[in-house]
Image: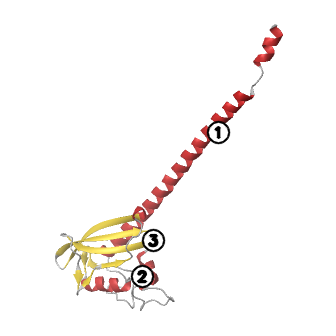
Amino acid sequence: MTKMKAQSKGQVFSGEFLIAFMLFMAGLMLILHLWDLSTRDLFQAEDQRTMAEFGVEAAEKLIRTPGTPENWVLDNVTSLGLSNKSRVLVPYKLLEFKHFMDHGQTDLCSLPGGSNYECNLYLLGIGGYDFYFNLTYLNGSVVEVDGEAMGVGRVPSNDTEAMTITRTAVLDGEITRLYFTVWR
């Protein structure tokens, strides 16, 4: 009898094996799911950080620098800037910038079917992202220069992958808000 007891202790029943296997698979699936969520969140956070970095650099460059050359026009610009003094915007540069980046215009673009926006986007240094630039007064009304509203670029179509940078600047003695949205 003692021999039988010793032998029965070492046996594994198929039901026990099945339960252990199911628990193992459930645990493995949970770990893989959590891993997937974590990596997705990590990549999304990295993308948001990159967008913010590009947006801040572009917005700061626009409102703090005169560009290159200092009195640039459409024909000779190599670096964009909208001020001659930090945070003091120059009206003619705003108009030039609007025309230079106008999504509907094609007169400055040599690419077949390309717009000024697509041809000149690289000058902002925002990588593979799109942008929308909007200038308003503190009361929320859109700034107009020579009758043209100061909004240019592509309006974001996807709010979840957009980052808006807000800066203040002076235009003709009035405080304005610059909204620079980088999006994908």
Mark closer to the observer (2, 1): 1
Reading the image, the residue beneath label 1 is: 25
Label 2 element class: helix
Residue name at image x 39 percent, y 88 percent: 105
Q: Does 90 sit left or right of 30 as displayed?
A: left
Indicate the colouring scheme: secondary structure
Give the percent coordinates (x, y) of residue 65.
32, 76
- Pointers 2 and 3 in contact (CB under 8 A)? no
23 versus 117 height, above or below? above
- Mark 2: give few (<14), some (14-19) or many (20+) Cα within 10 Å: many
Snapshot quadrant of residue 58: bottom left
Give the percent coordinates (x, y) of residue 116.
42, 85
Reading the image, the residue beneath label 2 is: 117
Give the percent coordinates (x, y) of residue 5.
78, 12
Q: Amino acid at mark 1?
A: Met
Q: CA distance from mark 2 to mark 1?
A: 52 Å
Q: Amino acid at mark 3?
A: Tyr
Reading the image, the residue beneath label 3 is: 129
Q: Amino acid at mark 2?
A: Tyr
Mark earlier in primary sequence (2, 3): 2
52 versus 73 height, above or below? above
